[in-house]
Image (tube, rainbow, N blue to C red):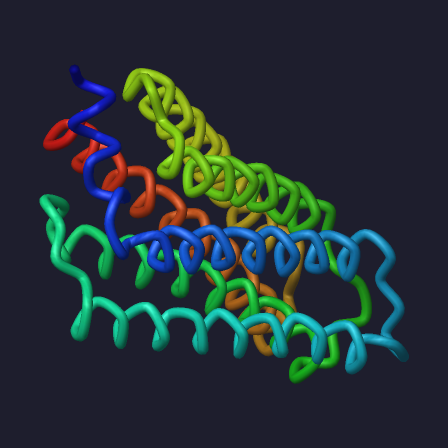
Amino acid sequence: MASKKWLSWIRGNDKMIVENLEKQGEVLVRATSDLVLLISNYEKNNITQKASVIKELEHEGDRLTHELFTMISSTFVTPLDREDISGLASSIDEVLDFTDGVADRFLLFKINKPAPYMLELSKILLLASQQISQILVMLRKINNSHTLMEFCNTIKKYEHEADGIYRNAIAELFETNDNPIEVIKLKEIYENLEESLDKCQDVADIVEDITLKYG
């Protein structure tokens, strides 16, 4: 009975909504994958091209979010609150925004070499994004809300792990770098990475709320 109640919200004209969310998840994974590649194979002379690819994906995410909001306002009538769907889409879009912000700052700040902590954080961001993408696919065919909660808990574990890395990175940055301008630049990159993972947790929190209401 629980699964039927859950699935009832995608049995009408809501298929396009679910497909849109799935596409957002795919775009997010592509962008975070590209960020890992940018940092792990860092070439200062080639940052413009790599950052522009992530920028294009961020624009694609914006387009999908706008498209979803249009669909919600015109056709979305379901037992699932519109606020839940719009909140989910907005949080995913914010993860993309901060991911793009990281890539953009490598370019704008002319960073010579990323710190190892940055690669660690970007890899965790990719893992969290992959969890989000799987969650969005499962919205179509979920038969056990417990499974969704497990994905949400995994994202929260990633965010907690990233918090520890972020704190160590900032502490080391202030202890080992006596160039105030460089400290400001690197700190901004760390902050964008940390914010992107915070937004991943926002996605998990929204999905948890949905499962409690409809699971």
Identify whether 88 is placed above or below 131.
Answer: below
| Residue positioned 56% across, 45% down in the render | 125
Q: Nearer the viewer, residue 57 or 199?
A: 57
State the image coordinates of residue 76 (x, y, percent, origin top left): 18, 62
Q: Nearer the viewer, residue 130 or 191?
A: 130
Left or right, 60 with respect to 144, comes to right
State the image coordinates of residue 197 (x, y, percent, origin top left): 44, 48
Q: Nearer the viewer, residue 96 or 173?
A: 96
Quadrant in the picture for the N terminus: top left
Number of marks drawn: 0
| Residue positioned 71% across, 74% down in the render | 53
State the image coordinates of residue 112 (x, y, percent, origin top left): 81, 71
| Residue positioned 37% across, 51% down in the render | 18
Quadrant in the picture for the C terminus: top left
Left or right, 150 with respect to 96, comes to left
Left or right, 194 with respect to 205, comes to right
Left or right, 160 with respect to 99, comes to left
| Residue positioned 60% across, 71% down in the render | 57
